[in-house]
Every structure is written in C-alpha cells, then in structure tokens.
C-alpha cells in the first residue's frame, strides 16, 4: 500500500513495502514511474522522440526481447538472476531495500546503495502467485472488471 507514503509513520506495512504490487494500481503505478524518467530524459536530450525500450510480453511471451546488452541488459552467464557484465546497468545498485527503515522512519529510502540489480522475468520463487506472466485471457478477464478496488485500498481489500 502507498498509505504510509502519504500518512507518515505509524501506518504498518505488514512486513513489506508493497506500493500496489498485487493490487489494482500495479500497472498505472509502474507505468508512471517509467514515463517520468522517460520524459526527463527527453528534456535532457532535447529529443521528444526518445523512448525507453519496453518488453511487450504479449508478443514475446517469456522471452524478454529487450533483455540484451545494448538495451536493458542480458542475463549473466554466471548467475541467471544477474545482469551481464557487458550491460551498463550491471553497475547500477539497488536502493531502498530496508523495510525496517520504512517501518520505523516512515520514509521510502535511506539512500544506501546495496546489491546489484536482480532480474527474474516471468517468475519469482519467493512469491508463488507470480510464477508466470499472464495469458491473454487473464488480461481480457481483468479488463472486464468494473470495480477494481475498495477501501481501504490495500492488496487484501475486497475486490482488490
């Protein structure tokens, strides 16, 4: 849930920083956080046609067509969840990994740089309900839902 971001300390996140994962805002939340840096880069580059590459899983299935070293980074030959050392992104580090700081300080990030970026497209061992990408019929079913969330707007809310 994003409630603590707006309400401050004292709003328990129940052991994890969720930010609408497994909730109805997942697509719009993540799309926003891709669009904003893309727009910032367009301004910095003075190129309104600049675009970040997107993985169209509806076409590519479980094969990530942008997971190449010249785009978003191929898989490492040594660790299937790491990026290839030939990718510029292999040197990037994850920030904001500490749930404890989020719980105690009510802040999203302590700005500490930690482990390298990990990737696990189309599967997540720690979260069995997201082991695969959705099938076209799953997407169609979701698009038919009229009421997609109810108060208090957490991932465990009715209709969420």
Image (spheres, grey):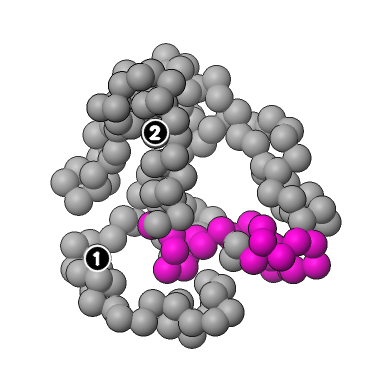
Q: Which mark is residue 16?
A: none
Position of residue 137 relative to residue 36, above or below, is below
Image x and y of residue 122, in percent: 35, 49
- Most common secondary structure along the magenta stretch: loop
| Residue at far left of view | 59
Picture quarter with the N terminus: bottom right
Q: Which quadrant: the C terminus?
A: bottom left
Instruction: Using the image as rendered, state which of residue 90 and residue 4 is in the foreground.
Output: 4
Say which residue appears at 64% left-offset and 66% top-offset: 3
Find disc 2 in the rendering and name its residue. Answer: 38
| Magenta-colored stretch includes residue 17 | yes
- Residues shaded magenta: 3-27
Q: Give the residue displayed 46% in from the left and 68% down from the top.
A: 23
Front-most of residues 67 and 25: 25
Residue picked out by circle 1: 139
Q: Position of residue 140 (x, y in %)?
A: 20, 69
Q: Can residue 85 be seen in this snapshot?
A: yes
Locate residue 136: give its quadrant.
Answer: bottom left
Q: CA separation, marks 1 and 2? A: 25 Å
Q: Secondary structure at mark 2?
A: helix
* SS category of the residue bearing label 1: helix
Mark 1 or 2, closer to the camera: 2
- For the point 73% across and 33% down, the residue is 112
Which quarter of the picture shows residue 88?
top left
Residue at (40, 57) in percent of width and height: 28
Q: Position of residue 82 (x, y in %)?
A: 49, 30
């Amino acid at each position: 849930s994003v409630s603590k971001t707006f309400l401050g300390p004292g709003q328990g996140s129940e052991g994890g920083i969720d930010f609408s994962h497994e909730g109805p805002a997942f697509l719009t939340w993540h799309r926003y956080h891709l669009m904003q840096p893309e727009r910032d880069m367009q301004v910095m580059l003075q190129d309104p046609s600049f675009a970040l590459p997107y993985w169209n899983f509806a076409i590519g299935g479980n094969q990530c067509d942008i997971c190449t070293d010249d785009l978003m980074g191929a898989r490492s030959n040594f660790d299937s969840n790491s990026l290839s050392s030939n990718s510029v992104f292999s040197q990037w580090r994850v920030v904001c990994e500490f749930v404890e700081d989020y719980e105690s300080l009510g802040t999203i990030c302590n700005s500490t740089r930690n482990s390298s970026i990990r990737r696990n497209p189309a599967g997540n061992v720690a979260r069995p309900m997201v082991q695969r990408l959705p099938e076209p019929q799953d997407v169609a079913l979701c698009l038919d839902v009229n009421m997609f969330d109810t108060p208090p707007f957490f991932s465990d809310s009715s209709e969420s």
